[in-house]
Image (spheres, rainbow, N blue to C red):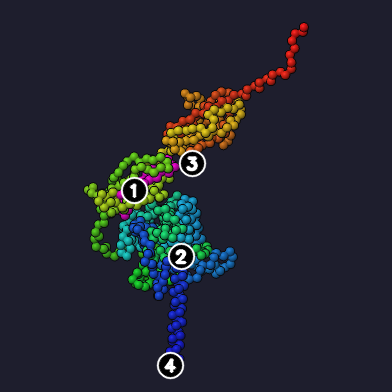
Amino acid sequence: MAAHFDRRLRKAAVTTTVAAVAVAALSASQAPDVTADGNGRQTTADNAPTSDTPPAESATGNSRYYTDLPPLNSPSPAPTTGTPASRGASEAGIPATVLDAYKKAESELSRSKPGCNLPWQLLAAIGKVESGQARGGRVDADGTTIGRIIGPQLDGNGFALIKDTDNGVYDGNSRYDNAVGPMQFIPSTWAWAGRDGNSDGKEDPNNVYDAALAAGHYLCRNGWDLADQADLKRAILSYNNSQDYLHTVLSWLEYYRKGTHEIPDGTGSLPVGRSDDTTVGTGSTGRGTGASSRPRTPGPATPSPGRTPSKPPASGSPTDPGGPSTTPSTPPTDPAPPTETPTPTDTVHHLENAGATGFSAVAGDTFAKKISTRAETKTGEAVGKVRVRFTVLGDTDATFTGGEKVAAVTTDPSSGVAVAPALVAGEQTGEFTVRATVIGRTVQGLDYVATVTERVADALTGTGQTELTCTPGGEFADPIEVKATLKGAVADKVAVTATLIKSEDDPAENDKGPYFKDADGKAVRTLTGRKTDAEGLLKLPKLYADDAEGTYILRLTTPGGATLDITLKVAKAADPTPEPSTGSSTGPEA
C-alpha cells in the first residue's frame, strides 16, 4: 500500500512538472507581452493597448476569426531540395499564390509608403487568422478564391450591428453586412480601402492580391510606422478590436518571421478554433484556447456542436462560406428581433454643405478652407454623433493631412457638423472631388469640387550673363541658368517656359536664329515642362545657332507672371586686326 501510494506521488509530481513545462513553452511561443496562467490560458497586461476605431470603421467589423496558435516548435526554413516531408510543419507553409500576394503588397507599400515599414509576414499572420490563408490556398490562377469566404452577418447578435451598406453586392446580404474575402473586409470599409493589386482593373475583396494590398494600405494609414511596437499594435487592433486577436496575430507574425516556405495552392491546413466557439475554451470570454494546430482538409468549416450544418455549396458558389464563417450570407430564417430603437445614423435623411465653397490651393500647399458637412433629418434637423466618411476621388495625388485619401469624422452632437481634415494639394494640377457619405446608412453622398493650380513665381533672374554671343552655325558656350522667387523666397518646382521669340513686341516663336535640340536632334525653339529645383534654380539645355546672323531674344515665363528676356547675338567673328609694320621707312633721296 505504501509502495502504491509512493508511486502515485511520483506520478503526480511528474505530471505537474510536465504541465509546468508545457505552460512555459506555450508562453514562450506567444508574441511579446502575452503570458499564460496556470492553466495555459492567455492573460493580458493591465496596460494593454486599445483601439478607438469603431466596428464600422474597422477592416472586419470585429467579426469572428481563427484562434489557433502556432505550434510550439519553430518553423523549418524553406528547403532547396527534398521531399514535401522535409519542408517542415504544414503550419509554416503558405500557399504559393497567397504568399506571392503578400510579398507583392509589401513591395508596393515599400514604394508608396516607405515610412510604414510593412512586413509581408504581418499580412500572412492576419491572413492566417482571418481565413486560414484563403482556406489553405483555394484560389484560382488569378488569385480569386474558389467560392466566396463570407463571415457571419453583423446583426448585433454576438457581433457588432452593421446594417447593409452595399445592397448585398459583396456579401449577398441586403439586410446586414458580412466580412468578405481572404482578408475579411466588411463592404463599408472595402468601399474606401479596396485596391487593385493584380492590375486587372477591378477591386475585388475576393481576390487575394487585391485584398492583401488593401490590407497593407489599411494597416499603413494614420502615419503608423509598423516597426514601432505601439503603432503595430494600434494597427492590428484597428483591424479587429480584440486583445485575443492582437495576441494571436502577433504570435503568427513572430512564427512566420522565424521562417516559412511556399507550398502548392490548395494544400494548406485550415485552423480549427474560432473566436465565437463557446464549446471550447476557458473563463467567460467565450473564446477557444486555440491550442490545436492539427492539419485539416481545406473546405467549409465544421459546424460547432449543437448547430445544424448547412448543405455545402458547390465549388465556386457565390455563397460558399469557407473561412471562419459557418453561416450562409443570406438573412436567417429565425423570427425578426423586436423593433430596434433608431440610432442617430438611422435618422439621417441627407447631407448638406455646412461651410465654404471654392476650394483651391497651389500645388504642394495646404488648402486654406476645410470641407464641412451637416447631417440632417428629413425635416432639416441636425443629427449629432453620426460618422461621416470623406473620400478623395478622381485622378489626383491630393490627400488629407497625414497622407490618406479617406477620413472618418463624427458629427458634432449639437450642430450635426463634421469637419474634414485639411486637404493637402499634390503636384498634379486640375480638379478633383471629395465625397462625403454617411457610414452605416445608404443616403446620397455630397460632392465637393477642389482645384489644384500650378506653383507660381513673381520674379525670374539670370545667374550669369544677360547677353550671349555665338558665330553662325556654332553653339553658345555659356549655359543659361535662372532663379525663380515668390515674394523674395525661393520658388521651387515652378514650371518655366522658354521661347525664342521674334521681338520684344512680337512674342510669337521665331522661325530662325538660335534653337534648342530635341531628343532626335531636331531644332526646337520652345521648351516646356521644365521646373525649378529645390533652390529655385533651372539650367536650360545647350543653345545652337543656325546661319542667320542677328540679335535674338530668349523669353522665359512662369505661372504667376514672372518674365525674363535674355539677348542672344549671332555674328561672324571679327577679322583679326593687321599687325603694324616693323620695317623702317626711308625718306626721299637727297
Q: Mark 3 points at which residue?
A: 534
Q: Which amino acid does label 4 sit on?
A: Met
Q: Name the residue under label 1.
A: 420
Label 4 packing within 10 angstroms: few (<14), some (14-19), many (20+): few
Q: Mark 4 points at which residue?
A: 1
**Rendered image: mark on residue 252:** 2
**Distance (Cα) linking label 1 and label 4:** 80 Å
If you read the primary sequence from the N terminus, does the residue marked by circle 1 or circle 4 appear first? Answer: 4
Q: What element carries label 1?
A: loop
Q: Which amino acid does label 1 sit on?
A: Ala
Q: Is mark 3 on a helix, strand or loop?
A: loop
User: Which residue extends farthest right?
Assistant: 590
Residue 151 occupies quadrant = bottom left
**Distance (Cα) linking label 1 and label 2:** 37 Å
Whether label 3 touches label 1, CB < 8 Å? no
Magenta span: 418-441
Please give left or right for residue 21 compared with residue 153 in the image: right
